Image (cartoon, helix red, strand yellow):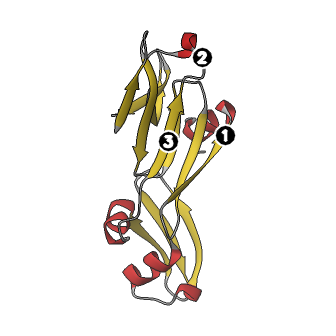
Amino acid sequence: MNAQIAAHLNVNESEIIRVEEWSQVLFVVVTGKGGRFVSKRVIRQEIKVVAPLTWTLTAEIRRQEGKKWVARITGTDAKYGFARQFINAKSVEWGKVGMKKAVFEIDAPGYYQDSDGDYFKVWATESGFDAEVCSYAEVKYNFAEKVHA
């Protein structure tokens, strides 16, 4: 992503000293020019469109059939723990008692949760998106209210 930030700021990538990610902006420190704020939305629009990540949930046995879902975690929620934005399935295979298989396409970086109870982190790469399973504690820490002194 540093290459896109450098192109946006019209500097060389080697001039970027530090990039801090805040909620809606990036704080970028450039050699000889100090710190600057860059909108994440602007950077996302300038990044070429990449292939979405396909996340497939499959019921291995009949009792696992039911509602399959994937949701992007957008913050905290007093009632449910996390505020979520649910993603529509791209395809669904139905079983006798519910969804047997559901395929979801993820096209934005962030933290996600699925109906199997797994949490995972998604990030953009040159060719698409990649993901890894992470812990509830990591997600909770990422969305914890930060107290500034």
How far from the left and from the top, in percent, is residue 91? 35, 36
Q: Residue at image x 45%, y 89%?
A: 11
Q: Residue at image x 65%, y 41%?
A: 133
Q: Residue at image x 55%, y 23%?
A: 59
Specify which label sits upstream in the sequence, 3 or 2: 3
Q: How many marks do you count on the picture?
A: 3
Q: Quadrant of residue 68?
A: top left
**Secondary structure under badge 1?**
strand
* Residue kind at label 3, given as amino acid type: Trp
- Quadrant where the C terminus sits is top right
Return the residue at label 2: 61
* Residue kind at label 1, given as amino acid type: Cys
In this view of the protein, which residue sits in the foreground, 137 or 99? 99
Q: Quadrant of residue 72?
A: top left
How far from the left and from the top, in percent, is residue 76? 48, 29
In this view of the protein, which residue sits in the foreground, 43 or 24? 43
**Secondary structure under badge 2?**
loop
Residue 14 drawn above or below residue 125: below
Q: How packed is label 1: few (under 14 Cα within 10 Å), some, or many (20 or more)?
A: some
Q: How packed is label 2: few (under 14 Cα within 10 Å), some, or many (20 or more)?
A: few
Q: Depth-wise, is mark 1 or mark 2 nearer the camera? A: 2
How far from the left and from the top, in percent, is residue 89? 36, 34
- Is residue 121 visible in the rendered image? The answer is yes
Return the residue at label 1: 134
Specify which label sits upstream in the sequence, 3 or 1: 3
Return the residue at label 3: 55
**Secondary structure under badge 3?**
strand
* Residue kind at label 2, given as amino acid type: Ile
How far from the left and from the top, in percent, is residue 121? 58, 46
